[in-house]
Image: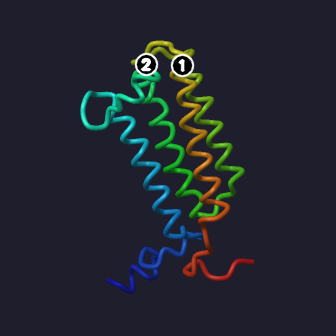
Amino acid sequence: MAAELRMSGIGNLPNFRRVPKPWAALLHIAVLGGSLALFLGRKPGFFRSEFILTHVSDFYLHVSNASISCLLYAGVGYFWLMLGVSMKRVALAGLAVIVGNFVYELFLPILNTRDIIDAWYGVAGVVCGFVVLWVIDRRGMVPSPAAGPTT
């Protein structure tokens, strides 16, 4: 069984061309956790911040767009970086998420009321994800030893 796993690439993951440094992996987990905490703050309880509410009273009405956009973009983008996808393509994916957000908020009222502010919160989520992915791409990834030599 172990030989089959090694041959299929599951055991040593040779398809990952780059692997994150420990601090980059922790940063990514922290961003995903922070985004999830903001999303969970929509309901009263542990994750709701009174500090945020005093400064931006309608923050939790729109934060789901920022959270979902950041989770989607940072999650997929991180995986793509490990696969060796260029940051340029990852940035284009971010633009696609932004365009999708605006199209959905302005033209598709399915399970949604049209709200341009929601779309702008989605932009903020993608921008936060982009900054983190850019830092991880520039300083937090190293070539995978399992990928073998690159030419």
Residue, disc 2: 58
Between circles 2 and 1, the one closer to the viewer is: 2
At x 58% / y 51%, what residue is drawn? Answer: 132
Looking at this rendering, what residue extends furthest in the right direction?
A: 151
Is 4 displayed left or right of 66 in the figure? left
Residue 66 image point, x, y percent: 49, 33
> Eyeballing the image, is 122 above or below 61?
below
Is 44 displayed left or right of 109 in the figure? left
Q: Quadrant of the N terminus?
A: bottom left
Q: Amino acid at mark 2?
A: Asp
**What separation in Å lies between label 2 and label 1 (alpha carbons)?**
10 Å
At x 54% / y 70%, what residue is drawn? Answer: 21
> Eyeballing the image, is 127 above or below 83?
above
Between 6 and 17, the one nearer to me in the picture: 17
Q: Quadrant of the C terminus?
A: bottom right
> Eyeballing the image, is 32 above or below 112?
below
Pointers 2 and 1 in contact (C-beta within 8 Å): yes
Residue 113 image point, x, y percent: 45, 13
